[in-house]
Amino acid sequence: MSKQMPKVNGLPQFIGPFKELLPDYIYYKRAQGYVFRDPNIYKLREMDMFFLENGVKKVEFTRQMYEAWTNVRPGEKESNVEHRRSAARGFACYLVSLGYENIYTGYDDTRIFKRDFIPYVFSKEEIRRMFCVISKWCVQEPGLRNDSFRIAMLLYYCCGFRKSEVLGLKMANIDLDTGRVTILNGKNNVSRIVVASDSLRFELKDYHRKYRTEAAPEEYFLTGEKTEHYPEGSLYGKFRTLLSEAGIALRADGGRQRIHDIRHTFCVHTLEKMQEKGFDLYTSLPLLSVYLGHKHITETEYYLRMMEEHFSGILEKSAAYSPNLFPKYDGEDGGTGAE
């Protein structure tokens, strides 16, 4: 069904066997601090419709249902399967918490997909070209639209934030005097404080002076011309235009770079800078893990499995205390777009 169906209380209509429970599940997750956006919600709606079309009429979640929903479909990308597995597992666990019996949560689903996705790391020259283009836009067409995009890109590259973390920043989350940026209940419900550099703090203060001096603490810091927060669609559209105008070539697999690749770039460039300054990676990696908002150091290790060419001497130094920190793969390099 089309995603253009009317919404009720901000949610699409659910008409399958879980129509009464799914809205409560979404409110429950949001109350826990999880960011539940439209892609997550519509995946749940797709699951509800799938079971309706397959004759499920009561609240149940059997192994057979789980496998039917999560089976790999012809020509399907691995990420789509993972999204279905995630939707099913989360909702099934919620059903268990409500006391429903004989619910299969996918606890023993040990399928491992081949990880052939390699995160893209922008070179410093590519980053320079991108910000030159952004500066040109701001001069040729000054105003909120370009300035909001410029600030978003500065926050992504200078602080390594996730896409949703920047779009969700409220006025109260930014201390313009000290440069402290507070991320509340980020991914995995992890909160953290990141201190912006003096140069970035100056840019944030200038944006605030131009557009947000009257904004209340609970309002969004970045705003659109006609919306209370900077639209995700506008962000993606301008990012694709930016890549083209900056002369950024397509990825090796023919795809386009993602906004999340800027986070990968921040991580690699930060490690390289630490190495240049003589930091010991044994202490630097845990610090970076906390800065990025990872729940465990293992997430950072997994996140940093990238092409050897981007690490210069990092691999050699890390091998002294953790030989398998950045593993090499036989044949084609593998990686994952870890968060």
Image (cartoon, rainbow, N blue to C red):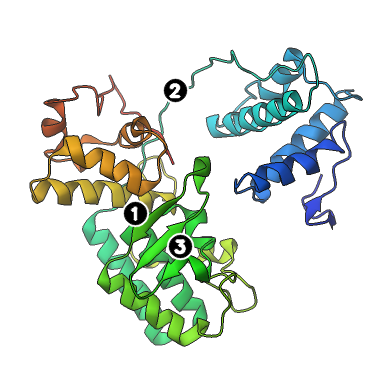
* Residue displayed at 53% across by 67% down: 170
Judging depth in this view, the residue of 230 and 255 nearest the camera is 230
Q: What residue is shown with label 2?
A: 114
Position of the N terminus, as image quadrant, is top right
Against 63, is 265 above or below? below
* Position above or below: 268 against 79: below
Where's residue 266, x and y in %?
30, 52
User: Which corner quadrant of the image does residue 94 belong to?
Assistant: top right
Q: Earlier in the sequence, mark 3 or mark 1?
A: 3
Label 2 crowd (10 A; few <14 / some 14-19 / many >=20): few
30 vs 110, left or right, is: right
Find numbered disc 1 in the image and state the secondary structure of the residue it sits on: loop
Name the residue beneath numbered marker 1.
Answer: 249
Mark 2, mark 1: which one is toward the viewer? 2
On the image, which quarter does residue 151 sit in?
bottom left
Image depth: mark 3 or mark 1 in front? 3
Residue at the spot of label 3: 239
Looking at the rendered image, the quarter that the C terminus falls into is top left
- 201 and 79: which is toward the camera: 201
| Residue 300 vs residue 218, the one in the foreground | 218
How packed mark 1 is, by other alpha carbons closer than 10 Å (few <14, some 14-19, many 20 or more), is few
Q: Residue 15, labelled with which disc?
A: none
Comes first in the chain, label 2 or label 1: 2
* Helix, strand or loop at mark 2: loop
Residue 23 at least partly seen: yes
- Residue in the picture at 57% in, 61% down: 232
